[in-house]
Image (cartoon, rainbow, N blue to C red):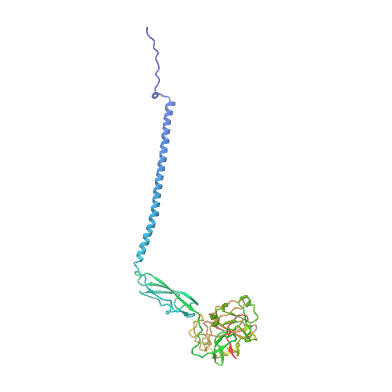
Amino acid sequence: MASTTSAKTPRPSPDTVVSGSVRGTAHHRDTKQQTHTAKRWRSLTKMAHRKTDLKIANMKNWESSFYLPLLLMGIVLLVNNCKKDKSDPIITWSNPADISYGTLLSETQLDASSDVPGEFIFTPPIGTKLGMGSNQDLKVEFTPSDGESYNNVSKTVKINVTKPVITFNSDLTYGSLTDQDGNVYKTITIGTQTWMAENLRTTKYKNGEPISQVTDNTAWSALTSGAYCNIYNTNDYDTISTFGRLYNWYAATDSRSIAPEGWHVPSNSDWNILKSYLGNTYPNNKLKEASMAHWALSINDDDNSSGFTAFPCGFRYEDNGQFTIYENNAYWLSTTEVATSSCILWLYDGSQLIEIEPASRIAGWSIRCVKD
């Protein structure tokens, strides 16, 4: 009897599964993981490269900050070594002796010398008229002829410029006069007249009463009575004794008399007698001090042959009380009236004429008295 056997269908192995639902899912998972891993690796690689680049950049910056100063220091040392190949010339120049104001700088003061040939340039130059004052700089710049072997050098010295003294005519004989303030003046006879050879500087009238001193500009411009002031309102004794004081017309014509005993403030008539005696040929030169000590510009023909010894003092304005530059003009009051004005004798710097002009009664002028 034949036996009956049931045939079993074999279970397929995983390798024979044809359904995509199992094998496809596993494959997709593996591929995604690989892709993620690759991206991660590339990211890490880029980061590593950036860090490497940063380290290299930092290294370069460090090298730059370290080596650049050394390079500059080397250049400086090289330049200095080159300079040391040249020598400095030796300039010989000492502080000059004091000069009086008005003395022009000359080779006497600017006498620097060097141990090698070259060119000297002085500041200020020869011919300069310095102002008054101590320890003023004189400088020289020296350029050697041999620029390959020597450096350019400079040197500075100091000079004192003292206050000027009046230069009288030493060939003439001067008299003497004392005013009511005790001030002593030189006097000089010119033709038939005897004049003060210095500007008046009294602070009192002949009877001993004081003349008002007015320093305020506004107050000065409003004056209708006698007053005086000092040039630039200075209180320096040497300046006052040299230049005298400035007076308005009211002080010059006051009945108490500003002039010393036996003297008077000149009128136009007195001034014209002086002009006539001096003649028409350069009368200005015969009156002016023969020196650059006071005049800003002096003419070579100024010889003070009359002995009058005129020097500039400027004046004080009537409208604002300001002072002019006193080195340019000399003015002296006259008692003569012209309408509502006074008169002055006027000498101008660089001019060869003498002028008598109308002038303000309020302005401040110098005074030269003439003997009665």
The quadrant where residue 116 appears: bottom left
Closer to the camera in the image, 221 or 272: 221
Quadrant for the N terminus, please.
top left
For the C terminus, which image quadrant?
A: bottom right
Judging depth in this view, the residue of 52 and 298 nearest the camera is 52
Q: Relative to 280, is 147 on the left or the right?
A: left
Whether 149 is drawn above or below 307: the answer is above
Counting from the top left corner in percent of width and height, residue 34 is at 41, 34
Q: Position of residue 128 (x, y in %)?
A: 47, 77
Left/right of residue 143 with respect to residue 310 in the rendered view: left
Q: Position of 316 compared to 21: left or right?
A: right
Identity of the residue drawn at 42% across and 29% down: 26
Figure quadrant of residue 354: bottom right
Q: Position of residue 288 (x, y in %)?
A: 52, 85
Q: Within the image, what quadrant is residue 251 found in?
A: bottom right
- Residue nearest the observer in this picture, 319 or 251: 251
- Picture layout, residue 122 above or below residue 25: below
Relative height, residue 237 to residue 146 (above, below): below
Spot the residue most to the top: 1
